[in-house]
Image (cartoon, rainbow, N blue to C red):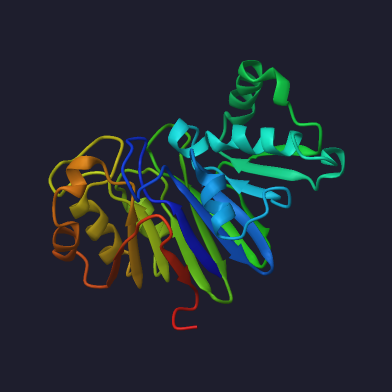
Amino acid sequence: MDVIVLGAGTAIPSSGYSPAAILLRSGGEEALLDCGPGALIKAAQQGLDYFQLQTIFLTHLHSDHTLDLVTLIQANESTPGVNNRKPLGIFSCSGTREWFEKLMIAFPDISPSYSFSIFENGLNAWDWADLHVSTYLTGHTKNSLAYRFDGKDGSFVFTGDAIFSEGLVRFCARADLLISECSFPEGQHNPEHLSADQVGNLAEKASVHHLAITHQYPAAHAVDLAKQIGRQYSGKLTLAMDGTSFSLPEGR
């Protein structure tokens, strides 16, 4: 399982920290996990062929996690042979179909002319490639999801945007790799996001092997996040940037 951070940032422009997107490779398949602005360019730099992409997982519908979906659809429609394109499936939270209908009203000239499906998975579990996929409601918005991928190479969890809860701790339990948002410094608690002390507490209580953080607002970039998280978490820590990559099992 290979996990490549394409976008480690937020909607606020910052060099090296593009909006949210992750490229996931496993079992010969590829998927995007969130699709924020710039995700397709970053994915192309990692060798992804947009015309062959068949799966996107969305954590929620905020623009910094979704807007390159419009770019992807337009790119497909601009490519010769689009009618023969492989099906594209979007796995997402409840409300996505209605959101997409409104998106197509705003961009009526790029409506997909190939097989395009939206699966509102909620709290369902299913299989993708050689991985078992499960989700958890994170509390960032009413429908926001975290994703967990379990397979023979290990387990990977992406929180998306989240708030701290014991349920999230259980969802992340013993993950080999946890990529968590870390929007704010320790003590700066927010009703929609995680702060450094909460992220450290989450990873420590969940006995996570390797924690990587993304999605920092400027206030978080201005402090020593490794030190703040390290007051709570004793495991391996990576402060991810665009292009940071991981392979499971680690040491492979």
**How many numbered marks appear?**
0
Between 191 and 9, which is closer to the camera in this rendering?
A: 9
Q: Can you say which quadrant of the picture contains the N terminus?
A: bottom right
Q: Quick check: 92 above or below 252?
A: above
Q: Is residue 25 left or right of residue 82?
A: left
Q: Identify the residue shown where x is 50% and y is 74%.
A: 248
The answer to which quarter of the image holds residue 137 is top left
The answer to which quarter of the image holds residue 69 is top right
Q: Is residue 234 left or right of residue 65?
A: left
Residue 237 at what x, y percent from top left? 28, 68
Q: Identify the residue shown where x is 39% and y is 62%.
A: 178
Q: Is residue 199 left or right of residue 9?
A: left
Q: Quick check: 4 above or below 186?
A: below
Between 71 and 168, which is closer to the camera in this rendering?
A: 71
Q: Identify the residue shown where x is 42% and y is 71%.
A: 176
Between 111 and 14, which is closer to the camera in this rendering?
A: 14
Residue 87 at what x, y percent from top left? 78, 45
Residue 139 at what x, y percent from top left? 38, 38
Q: Is residue 247 left or right of residue 82?
A: left
Q: Quick check: 37 above or below 159?
A: above
Residue 8 at what x, y percent from top left? 38, 50
Q: Identify the residue shown where x is 58% and y is 40%.
A: 92
Residue most extreme to the top: 105
